[in-house]
Structure formats: structure tokens, C-alpha cells
Image (tube, helix red, strand yellow):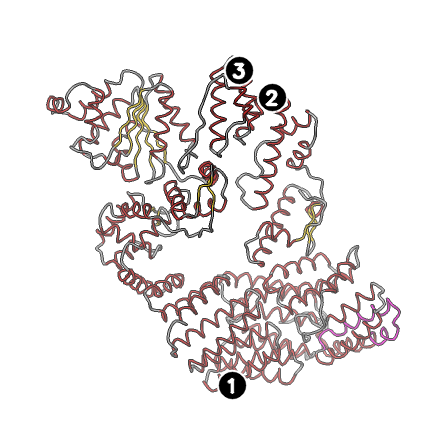
Amino acid sequence: MNRRTETARDRLLEIFWPDAEPDRARDSLKTALWSIRRCLKTAGVEADEFLQVSKSTLRWAADTVVDAMQFTELAAGDNGSSTRAALDLFRGDFLEGDYDNWAVAERERLAALYERVLSRVVRTSKDTDAAQLLIARNPYDEEAYVALVEAELQAGRRSAAVTWIERCRKALSEIGETPSESFEERFRSIIRVEPVVADALALPFAGRESELGLVAGKIVDASTGHGSMTLVHGEAGIGKSTLLNRVIHIARENRLRVLQVRCTNDAPGPFGPWQAVFQGVDDADFDTFVRAHGGDVATSVSRAIAAALHDPAIIVVDDVHELTGDALEIFVSLARSASVTHAVIAGSRPEGVAVLRSRLHDLEPEEIALGRLDRKNLKWALSQALGNEQPEVLDVLYGRSGGHPLFFTGLLNALVNEGALRREGRTWQLIKQIDAELELPDNIRRFIDARLQARGDAPRAVACALALEPAANADDLASVLRFDESTTLDALDDLLSLGLITQPVVGPQFAFAHDLIREVAASGLNAGRRALLHRAFAQRLAASGELEASLRLARHFQAAGDLLSASQAYCKSAHAALELNAAQDAIERCDAGIAAAEKLERTPPRDLALAKLYRTSAQAAMSLGNPGEAIKRAREAVTAARAAGDIHESSAAMLDLSVIEGAAFHISEQESDAAEAARTATVSGDAALEALALVQRASAARRLGHREEALADCRSAHDLAQRCERPDIIAAALEEFVRAHMTWWSFSEAMESARSGLDAARRSGPSAEAALRIARAGLWYLLERLDEAQAEIRTAMLAMDEAAVRQRGPLGSPIHSLPVIRFVGCFMAAKIESERKQWDAVAKQLEGATALTNVAKLPRFAEALSLLEIDVMLRRHMSGDDESAHARVAALSESSFPQDTIGWSDCPELAKARDAARGRRDDAEELVRTALNVLEGNAHQAPLESDRAFARLAAAAEEIGAAAVATRAQERSRYYRSRRRAAAGTAWGAETRS
């Protein structure tokens, strides 16, 4: 609908995912774009011809017919043909059922336009079809009624005209209005009808059109002597009686005799309501009749009642579930005899349905199961009751009631009683803000509580226990309540028969039929008894050892008042969430555990629990790409661990902090934190932890350009890991060896580490293997063995797929998380394809890296992506590339990160110089000189692929005629390339033997 215009990605995120976290919204947009492309390809068209996508905007480029836009154009016309064409084109509301803000706004705009077109037709041509369509959408348009009344009068149908006049007055009365004086004057001579003014707040009948239509068919059949048996059933308060009353009204309008029977549980005598029914249709004395037919009272009474119905009739028996004994037998017998020629309709709650099905099975009754009302119907009903639309009221009432009519109405009246809704003239207005968790009114609470207690204390206790632990099965409930199996199962059967709980096909064994029932059930026992149940559930879940149950376990411990156990369980559940890549859930669980622990007095166990919670939440924050929050939480973990006096936990917390600082490229902090972790690990005698800390310190030393320190730490870490027999740490140490050796072109040592490291990584697991293979790919890249580098990347990607299935990382630290490994793999693959000038393949790999949003937004990773994209665009030099590169350059800052195997030898100064040279800017020569100086320093600190960087700079200098810079850059490029080739020796471009 906005074709051929650039639409910002951020604007789409605001429209379609306004409430989502930014990263999740961007992921959703990527998924949507992928689906659109797939649909276009499936249709046999080229996706890029229709949808043009850049990093910041989208554009629909193809000529596409959109009926909504056609309708708008036709509706704007002022001639009859365009107006008629607009009406013919309108087939229904825009995206009916979609309640996103943008869809609602467009739907309402088009609906209003459609009404204006209908109104125009009515006023110009008095078209009755258009008038009826207009009234169906806007029952308050007086001109439409005028057209219909006049048409009926011209046709001689005075009664039909009167009906339209009455309907107009009634519709306007619902919004506190009356027809105009001209309307009343014009039709005053036809009939005087007093306006209808509702004097109380009530919902009109709504949402049962299909059910009503089915029963109406039974009424029509009965009028011709064809009987039927219909069973209407649903949970208490769902609207059975309302529907049956509507049916009775229709039957009377069709001049059928109505026999209405209401069953109650307090009817006197064994025959329930049938004595009164008998006396209403027969002159005989009931007691005398019963004594005379003592052999088969039920059959005799039912036949007598049926025989008294000479004309076609409808027999409506509500709340049949209340009937027992003789009263039930009379109903069954009446149904058999009367349903031959009359319409018999019975209403029942769930507890009576099984018995009725069994007793009436030979009649094959038509069943109508009433469910809850949908939002659309309740929206209409509420607007009728209030006199206007109140979206906020609808949202709260529908959210709390789930569409249950009784609960919806009860909550609505609660708003009136609280003073939140106040009548102003003919409408009701919301005068204060209402809470989404609106307090349940006493009458609804009592209604639900009565249902829960209908079968005694045991079902109520079981319901309370189930409300406290929704995942409980029958064995769990029996155990915590200390009921025997028979008592528990009987109680569950009672709750099922009453329709209070259900048995879902998937998920928990039992579920409440409505959240409000669960809410009332949860408060069914006193606080002390509930605490005991929570403790019993916690003990049972703890004994099961199920990791998935840890969140439930935490909540039970917390409700039972055991806050230390709760905090420990929250930490365990956060670990479970992290393994499922649900980092935000992990943070929320950690925060719940932290809140619980902080309520306790300060003790070593409490501080230790806090340390573990902060460590876990720091890893989760890093997984979400939030290094600042991760560092903050990691430091809190260190503080708590030191307060606990636990040297091992202190070392582990400090190691985590080092890892996170490293991922954020806070290199000096990474080095000092790793050194501290190594020292404390040495004191505690934890060789494995010391080895991990040394790997981190080696990584920091390499990034800082401290070659000897990096290699020494790698060797120490490797030796410790071998003594511990930890292949995962051996692999990590050798991976760092590979990166350090290839940074300074010690290629023979790097190849040896790559060979032995692969053996250790394979023993450790697929994620360790993937990380090691990506390091090897970097080695082959520097050795100009691009085929082998590509093969390593492909194998690494397969290993990552396997690791994703296993859901566990090798070291449990953010730097080794699968998203980071996958990002580096995609980035490395893009570098390789870039050297081969396979631009489409480069774009694909960069898209894969960018899709890992939580990694791609980390500053160093984001910079590396931008630099590679700029390099590709400036070298590819296609239409629009220079402009796109310039836009990316403008967003770069000065160099703040050391040279590393993430960004390699590229840097912002080089990108800015190349961009300025390409644009022939005045400051281009100054920028190429600055870039030359920066590259000289970088190459001295970490050679990596400095020759390529100098070659790029030389080409830029030549573009602007900066001969001195070009010459110097060419010399440095040749020098470093010759050194790199000499360092490789026979390994240069040779086939790998590992």
C-alpha cells in the first residue's frame, strides 16, 4: 500500500511489533521478509524485482493491484458509475480478525469510507439495498430509515414501514438520541411509538447466531409436525438460559405453544417440576393421577403432558442436570414421546451431559455445546450497553473473563459499583483508570466457590492444590494432600464432571476451565495450609531432580517462605533457560532469585547464592548483546562471592568477568581480571579454573600486542589442562595458540597447534570443534589456501548445527557461546569470498552474521561488519556502492579496538581514507596520510594481513594522486607480503595434511 516509496525498517518495527524488545522485533522482521521472499519465489517470480531491501529501508517496487486502494480511488469519484463500482468492489472489512494497530486503523478508515459511499447512494437514489447495508453497519443513520420507510409505504406494506420506524427509534434510544422532528412529523400519522430508553446497564443478546439458527430450524420443523430432541450444554454461566429464552421468544413469534420447565435442586417432592407442569396442562388432580398409575408413574405423567399438547409445541426444559430419580425418569419418557411431533430442547451444565447422553442415546439428540463469546461479539454487546465504544474497558474485561459471559457481566458491574464507570446522560463513561488485574467481584467469587464446594471438601482441596501447582498429576495431588488414590481420583472426577477442570490433549494432565476458577481455587484454603502445600510440592519436585521443574520448585519454595532454597532453585531454572537460548527468561528468573535472597539476613550461604545468580544473569545479559549490563552483573557476582568468603566462587566470578570484558573488547580489564582469577585459582588449588583464566589472559595479551606473554600463558594453560585431563580446556588453549602464532606469522607452530588442537576439540564436543576449525580457517586464509579455509568453515557450521541440538557450549562462557562462534564463522567466510570477489556469496555470509543480532550489535563486532561491508562496496564499485559505503563510513568512530582475528588488519582510518579518495574530497590526502601512520603502527603490533591493508591504501592514494603515500603504501604492502610468504615457507598455498 506504500509501493515505490522507501519505508524505514524502524517504522515497520513500530507498526508491527510495537511492544516487542528491539532485538526480537528485528528478528521478527527478518523472518517476515524471508517468508515474503519464499512466497514470491514459490509463485515463480524474482523476489528482488518486487521487494528491494537495504540495511535501513524496504521498498515494494512492483506494480501491484490492491483492492483497498482501488476502492479508495473509486469512492473518491463523484459520478454514479464509480460509486457503484466501489460498492461492488467492497467484499468485507479490511483484514478482518487482525487487531494490530495499523490494521485496525486502516479497517476503520475503509469502513468509514464505505459508510460514506452507502450514505451518498441512499441520499441520491434512495436505494433500499444500500440503505439496509448502511443500517447493518451504522444503525443510527436516519436517512437510511427514511428511504426504507418510504419504500415500504409506496409498496403498501404499512406494517413493515412501522417496523422500520420502531427500529430507528430504538436504535437511537440506545445512544441517548431520538429521531429528528422532521422524521417524526413525516411519519406521525402512521403510528405513535414511544422511544425505548434503557434504564439499566445490561449486555444485549450477542454471539449465538449459528446456535440460534440451528434451534430456529427445529422450531420450523415442529410447526409442520416434525419433532426433534436438542441438548444445549455448557459450563455454568455460559449463556444457556439466555439462549433458551431467545428460543422461546422466537417460538411465540411463530405462534407455537411453549411449554417452559425450569428445574431446581430444591423442588419439593420426588417429581420435581413435573407436578406443576402436569397441573398446568391437565385438569386432573396430580396426586390422584399418581395413585391411579402407580405401576409406571413416569410414563403415565409424560404421556399425559404430551397428550395435552394438541397443537405444534416447543418444550424447553432448562437445568436438566438438577433432575434425579422420578423427576429424571419423567423427563426421559417425555422426551421419547413428545419429540416425535414437538421440538424438545433441554439445557444442562456439564455434570448432567453424560447421564443425558446415556439415557437419550436412541433419540440421537442434536447437541449444541456453547463456548465463550469472541472479542468481536463482546465488543458490539459492550458498545450497546455503554452507549459507545470503550476499548480500554473491553480490553480489561475480555482479558480477565476470557469471553465468559457471566464473568464479563459481573466484572462490568463491578466497574459500575466501584465508580469506575458512571452514567452521563444516555451513555456510560470511564472516569478513572482500571487495572488489567481487576478485582473479582464478590458475587462471581461466591458463584465459583459454590461450584468448587458442590461435591464436598475433597474436590475443593484438590482444586486448591492444582491451582498452586498447575502441572501436578493425580499422584502429585494425592501425595501432597495425603489422600488415598480413590479419594483423589473421585475428587478429580467430580471437578471434571462439573466442568471446573479439563484434561488437555497435550501439556499438563489437568487444567482449569477458566483462569478465574483457578484464582478462586487458589484461595480456597487458609494461608497456613497453602504454605504447607507449597512446601510439600517443593519437596516432591526436589526429589524428582527434573531440571524443567526448577522454576516451579523455586516458586513453591518462595511461597512456603524458604527464600534461600527459592533463590537456589531460581538459579537452576535460569541455567535451564540459558540452555534453551531463552536469555531474557534467564535474567528474569535470576532477578526473582536475587530479590528473594536479598530479603534474607546476610550470611555466607545467602551471599554465595547471590554470587551464582549474578554470574548466571551476567552470562544471560551477554547473550542478549548487552555488555554494559553483563559487566555490571559480573562485578556484583565478584562482590557477593568475596562476601561469602568462597575463594573458588570468587575465582569463577572473576573469570566470568574477564570473559565478558574480553567479549566487550575491554582488553586491559580482561587482562587484569584474568590475572586475578588465575591467582585466586592457584591459591584454591583449582588447576582447571587457573587454566581457563590463563587462556583469557593470553587472549588479552595477544590483542594488546604482547607476543611473549600471550604465548607463555598459552603454554601454561595447555600444561595445566593436560594435567587435569580436560580436553575442552586443552582445545581452548590450543585455539588461542593458533590465533597467537598466526597473528605474528609463526606458521609452523600455528599448524602444529591447529593439528593437535583439532584432536582435543573433537574429544570435547561439536562447539569446541567449531571454534577450533574457524581458527584454522583463519590460518589457511593467511597461508592463501582459500579452498581449505572454506572447507574448514563448512565443517565448522555442521559442527555448530550439531552443538545447537545438544544445547550446551564447551566452557559455559559468553565468549564461547554458539552465536559468537557462528558470527565469527560467517564473518570469516565473507572474508574468504571477498578475496575471491564472489560478491553474492559475500552478501549471503554477511547477512548470516547480521542476523545474529545479539552478537552483531556488540561494538567490536558491529565495527568489523561495517568495515568489511565498506571494503566490499569500494572494491565492487557497482551502482550505488560508493554512496552506501559513504553512509557507513559516516557512522564509524576513531580506532578504539586493537587488531584481532575479528576485524583483522582493517580499521576505521583506512575506511575513511578510501571513502574520501573515492569521493575526491578536499581532506582525502590528509586522511590517507593519517591512515598510513595508523597502519604502520598496527602492522608493527600485529602483522596479520597488513599487506592487504597497505595495498587498499595504495590504491586509494593513487586515485587522488597522492604519490608519496601511494609509493610508501605499495612498499609496505610488498614488504609485508614477502615476509608473510617467507614465514609460510612450503605451507604457502599447499594442500593441508591435517
In 3D space, how far apart are the residues under numbered discs 3 and 2 (Cα atoms)? 13 Å
Q: Which residue is mark 2?
A: 126
Residue 770's spot in the image, x, y percent? 57, 67
Instruction: Please report whichever mark, 2 or 1, sits nearer to the chain's N-terminal start.
Output: 2
The correct choice, above or below, for 388 with respect to 437 in the image is above
Disc 1 residue type? Arg
In 3D space, how far apart are the residues under numbered discs 2 and 1 (Cα atoms)? 93 Å
Residue 153: mark: 3
Q: Is residue 867 left or right of residue 636?
A: right
Residue 100 in the magenta stretch? The answer is: no
Q: Which residue is mark 1?
A: 679
The correct choice, above or below, for 319 with respect to 606 in the image is above
Q: Which residues make up the magenta segment?
A: 943-969
Instruction: Please report whichever mark, 3 or 1, sits nearer to the chain's N-terminal start.
Output: 3
Instruction: Please report whichever mark, 3 or 2, sits nearer to the chain's N-terminal start.
Output: 2
The correct choice, above or below, for 223 with respect to 82 in the image is above
In 3D space, how far apart are the residues under numbered discs 3 and 1 (Cα atoms)? 101 Å
Disc 3 residue type? Leu
Residue 967 in the magenta stretch? The answer is: yes
Q: Residues within 10 Å of mark 2 (few under 14, many from 20)?
A: some
> Decide: marks 3, 1 in contact (CB < 8 A)?
no
Question: On the rendered image, what quadrant is the N terminus found in?
Answer: top right
Quarter assignment of residue 193? top left
Disc 2 is placed on an element classified as loop
Residue 146's spot in the image, x, y percent? 55, 22
Disc 1 is placed on an element classified as helix
Disc 2 residue type? Lys
Residue at the bottom extreme of this rendering: 683
Q: Residues within 10 Å of mark 1 (few under 14, many from 20)?
A: some
Quarter assignment of residue 196? top left
Q: Is residue 400 left or right of residue 800?
A: left
